[in-house]
Amino acid sequence: MFLAAYFTSGRILFMVFFIISFLILAIYSYKKDIKSHKIHYKNAAKNLLIYGSITLIVFVAIRLFTGN
């Protein structure tokens, strides 16, 4: 009952339209720029893995040494 006041049929319709439109535009934009992605972001996955691992190791080390 509480959420029924916030999610009217008009708002639900707007959310569905917004999500569908956003996904279509995001896919179109990605397909349009795929050539430049291969040039400029060719090592992005490797860098993300390296920096993510470093962040995780530092986080775990801080948690172990402080005891929280």
Image (cartoon, rainbow, N blue to C red):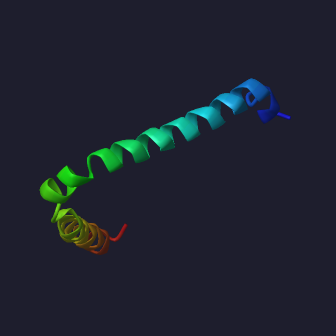
Q: Measuring from the top left, give residue 27's x and y in whole percent.
A: 42, 47
Residue 10, given in percent of the width and then of the height, sits at: 74, 24
Q: Residue at x 49, y 38 (%)?
A: 22
Is residue 25 shown left or right of residue 40?
Answer: right
Q: Quadrant of residue 51?
A: bottom left
Splitting the image into 4 quarters, where does residue 57 fall? Answer: bottom left
Question: Is 55 rendered above or below residue 40?
Answer: below
Left or right placement of residue 17 versus residue 28 in this view: right
The image shows residue 11 at horizontal and vertical percentages of: 70, 27
Q: Quadrant of the C terminus?
A: bottom left
Residue pictured at 20% horizontal, 62% vertical: 44
Is residue 41 depicted above or below 65 in this figure? above
**Residue ID at (13%, 54%):** 40
* Front residue (pair 14, 64): 14
- Please tell me which residue is depicted at 35% across the width and 42% down the height of the picture: 29
Frontmost residue, 52 versus 13: 13
Q: Is residue 7 above or below residue 47?
A: above
Q: Position of residue 65 (x, y in %)?
A: 25, 73
State the residue in front, 7 or 36: 36
Side of 20 where 1 appears, left or right: right
Q: Locate the N terminus and report the quarter of the image it occupies.
A: top right
Relative to the observer, which residue lies in front, 34 or 54? 34
Q: How many marks?
A: 0
Residue 8 visible (yes or no): no
